[in-house]
Structure formats: structure tokens, C-alpha cells
Image (cartoon, rainbow, N blue to C red):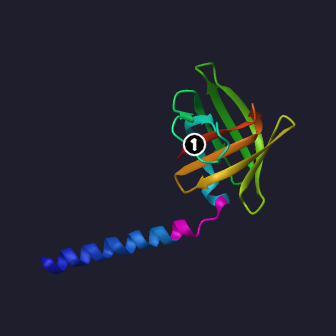
């Protein structure tokens, strides 16, 4: 019985380590592809590019972004309970894959990728900053 348990544990470790290696080998482009649900939205009040306590809320904005591998995207966002606004865009990663550039209806967005993993994405948008403060968007798959 002890040998069986050790074999199962070794096999589980092997699969877990292979999965982690596969995840670590993904490019930022590959990690970005998929549908992301907005979980938090807020303002970088002190402009330190760190999410500080009180800078985000989970109830201000709802919606999702879908980034397709071919460089197209769809966003559907609702702000403060208003009906969702859906738009199509194109996207690409620029500046060593540290920024996400989007183009929608002739408007270009240039958004810093603060962090990205297979399941979590944090963006800092300085392009539409109001009162000189950038906006945070935290998303998950």
C-alpha cells in the first residue's frame, strides 16, 4: 500500500511540474488570449503604479474582454449599473510585451500590463487619466 501511495504521489508531482513548466513557457500573447472578466476597477490616486488599499472597487465596473489569437477583441462593459456597451477592437502587445495597444472606432489605447498570468491580469491605463490619475483594471479568466 505504501508503494502505491508513493507511486501516486510521484505521478501527481510529475504532472504538476509538467503543467507548471508549460505555463511558464507561455508568452504574454498566449496568456492574454481568452476571455477575461473584470473583477476590480479603480483609480491610482497617488500615481505610484501600485494598487493601494481603497483604490479599487469590485462594484463600479462589470463586464469582460475577449482577446483572440488573431489580434481581434471584443469588450462588453457596464459602468455603475448602466446597460453594457459592447465594442470590437484590434490589439497587439508592444514595448517588449509590457503594453497592450488597442484600436477601437479609430481611438487608440495604450495600456500598461502591470501583471499577467494564465488566470489573472492587472492593467494600468494612463491614456484616459482623469485628474492626472491612471485607472486600474483587475481581471480573471
The segment highlighted magenta reads: 22-28
Furthest residue in direction left, as rendered: 1
- Tell me if residue 24 is in the magenta stretch: yes
Nearer-the-camera pick, 44 or 36: 44
Asked which secondary structure carries label 1, the reply is: strand
Is residue 21 depicted above or below 101 in this figure?
below
* Picture residue at 67% right of the left edge, 58% below the top: 29
User: Is 59 placed left or right of 87 in the picture?
Assistant: left
x and y, in percent, of residue 85 in the image? 69, 26
* Picture residue at 22% right of the left edge, 77% below the top: 6
Residue that badge 1 annotates: 138
Total labels: the figure holds 1
Image quadrant of residue 52?
top right
Mark 1 neighbour density, 10 Å: few (under 14) some (14–19) many (20 or more): many
x and y, in percent, of residue 106 in the image? 87, 37
Is residue 59 depicted above or below 2 in this figure?
above
Nearer-the-camera pick, 95 or 78: 95
Furthest residue in direction right, as rendered: 106
Q: Quadrant of the N terminus?
A: bottom left
Image quadrant of residue 25?
bottom right
Amino acid at each position: 500500500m505504501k508503494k502505491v501511495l508513493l507511486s501516486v504521489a510521484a505521478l501527481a508531482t510529475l504532472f504538476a511540474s509538467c503543467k507548471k513548466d508549460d505555463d511558464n513557457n507561455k508568452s504574454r500573447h498566449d496568456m492574454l488570449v481568452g476571455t477575461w472578466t473584470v473583477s476590480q476597477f479603480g483609480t491610482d490616486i497617488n500615481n505610484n503604479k501600485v494598487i493601494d488599499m481603497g483604490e479599487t472597487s469590485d462594484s463600479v465596473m462589470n463586464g469582460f474582454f475577449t482577446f483572440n489569437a488573431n489580434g481581434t477583441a471584443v469588450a462588453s462593459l457596464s459602468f455603475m449599473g448602466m446597460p453594457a456597451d459592447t465594442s470590437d477592437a484590434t490589439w497587439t502587445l508592444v514595448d517588449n510585451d509590457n503594453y497592450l495597444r488597442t484600436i477601437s472606432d479609430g481611438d487608440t489605447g495604450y495600456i500598461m500590463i502591470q501583471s499577467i498570468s494564465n488566470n489573472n491580469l492587472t492593467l494600468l491605463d494612463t491614456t484616459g487619466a482623469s485628474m492626472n490619475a491612471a485607472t486600474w483594471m483587475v481581471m480573471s479568466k
